[in-house]
Image (spheres, rainbow, N blue to C red):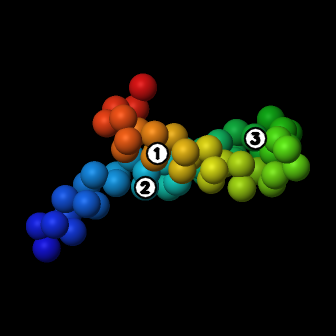
Amino acid sequence: MVFVMQRLVKMTPFLFGIGFIAPLLIQIMALGGFAGPWGLSRAAFGLAFGAGWGLLAVWRGRWL
């Protein structure tokens, strides 16, 4: 159980990226009238961006 909790806490930036950053970016793009780049939908781009930023934060150990 401790192992599972340690892994979950370590992956928190990734979960934050797909659970908060992605929907926020999707809504900002929708309000601004922007389409996703490279033919992607807003949702696909938002999830890719949020997941990428979250994984980078997990890998580096910090957000910035």
Label 1 vs 2, first from the N-terminus: 2
Residue 29 marker = 3
Which amino acid type is shown beneath numbered disc 2? Answer: Leu
x, y percent for residue 8: 28, 61
Q: Are marks 3 and 1 in contact (CB under 8 Å)?
A: no
Q: Nearer the viewer, residue 9 or 61?
A: 61
User: Which quadrant: the N terminus?
Assistant: bottom left
Vertical order, 3 against 59 (above or below): below
Label 3 vs 1, first from the N-terminus: 3
Residue underneath mark 1: 54
Which amino acid type is shown beneath numbered disc 3? Answer: Met
Q: Are marks 3 and 2 in contact (CB under 8 Å)?
A: no
x, y percent for residue 12: 34, 52
SS assignment at label 3: helix
SS assignment at label 1: helix
Which mark's residue is nearer the viewer, 3 or 1?
Answer: 1
User: Which quadrant: the C terminus?
Assistant: top left
Residue 15 marker = 2
Image quadrant in which you'd find residue 11:
bottom left
Q: Are marks 1 and 2 in contact (CB under 8 Å)?
A: yes
SS assignment at label 2: helix
x, y percent for residue 38: 85, 44
Image quadrant in which you'd find residue 30:
top right
x, y percent for residue 24: 60, 44
Whole-Å distance between the Cαs marked 3 and 2? Answer: 21 Å
Crowd tier of the residue under label 1, counting other residues whose Cα lies within 10 Å: few below 14, some 14–19, many 20 or above? many
Residue 3 marker = none
Which mark's residue is nearer the viewer, 3 or 2?
Answer: 2
Could you tell me which residue is drawn at 50 percent across and 55 percent down?
A: 19
Farthest bottom residue in view? 1
Q: Nearer the viewer, residue 19 or 63?
A: 63
Q: Nearer the viewer, residue 36 or 25?
A: 36
